[in-house]
Amino acid sequence: MKVQYGDACLSLQQVYDWTRNFMNGISSLTDSPRPGQAHRVVTPEDTAAVEDIVKENIYVLYIIYILLYLYVIHYFYNIY
């Protein structure tokens, strides 16, 4: 198989891992969620709470703008 498919061929260890998983009843080909991955849920209650905080203290809005500006600079120009 290595001759036919080259580097795109699965290694023998990967074949053993897949075989073990299928024998144990795991038939999904997608990745399982891992601990530590970000999980974000935005609800209308959360949005309203943030809007209230911003309305109470306009300084928070300036901080948000500054953080957004720094993010854009970092993302597009790799600065900071």
Image (spheres, grey):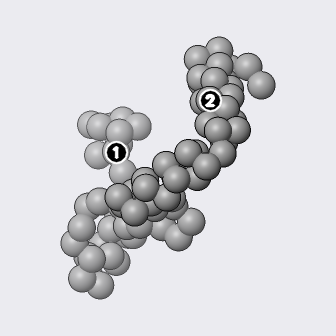
Q: Tell me which residue sits at (40%, 63%) in the image.
A: 45
Disc 1 residue crowd, few under 14, some 14–19, many 20+, Cα 10 Å? few
Q: Tell me which residue sits at (49%, 58%) in the image.
A: 49
Question: Residue 70 placed where, x, y %?
Answer: 68, 26
Q: Secondary structure at mark 1?
A: loop
Kindly indicate the quadrant of the structure image that contains residue 72.
top right
Question: Residue 36 placed where, x, y %?
Answer: 56, 66
Mark nearer the viewer, 1 or 2: 2
Kindly indicate the quadrant of the structure image that contains residue 14.
bottom left
Q: Is residue 5 left or right of residue 41?
A: left
Q: Is residue 21 left or right of residue 38?
A: left
Question: Residue 29 placed where, x, y %?
Answer: 26, 61
Q: Is residue 7 left or right of residue 55?
A: left
**Image quarter in which the C terminus is found:** top right
Q: Is residue 80 visible?
A: yes
Q: Tell me which residue sits at (58%, 17%) in the image.
A: 76
Report the amino acid beneath label 2. Answer: Tyr
Which of the labelled discs sits on residue 65, or is there none? Answer: 2
What residue is pinned by disc 1? 9
Q: Is residue 72 left or right of residue 59?
A: left
Q: Tell me which residue sits at (36%, 60%) in the image.
A: 43
Q: Secondary structure at mark 2?
A: helix
Above or below: residue 34 compared with residue 54: below
Q: CA distance from mark 1 to mark 2?
A: 48 Å
Name the residue furthest front. 56
Instruction: Give whichever of 57, 62 is nearer the camera.
Output: 57
Q: Is residue 40 visible?
A: no
Report the amino acid beneath label 1. Answer: Cys
Name the residue furthest top. 77
Kindly indicate the quadrant of the structure image that contains residue 65.
top right
Disc 2 residue crowd, few under 14, some 14–19, many 20+, Cα 10 Å? few
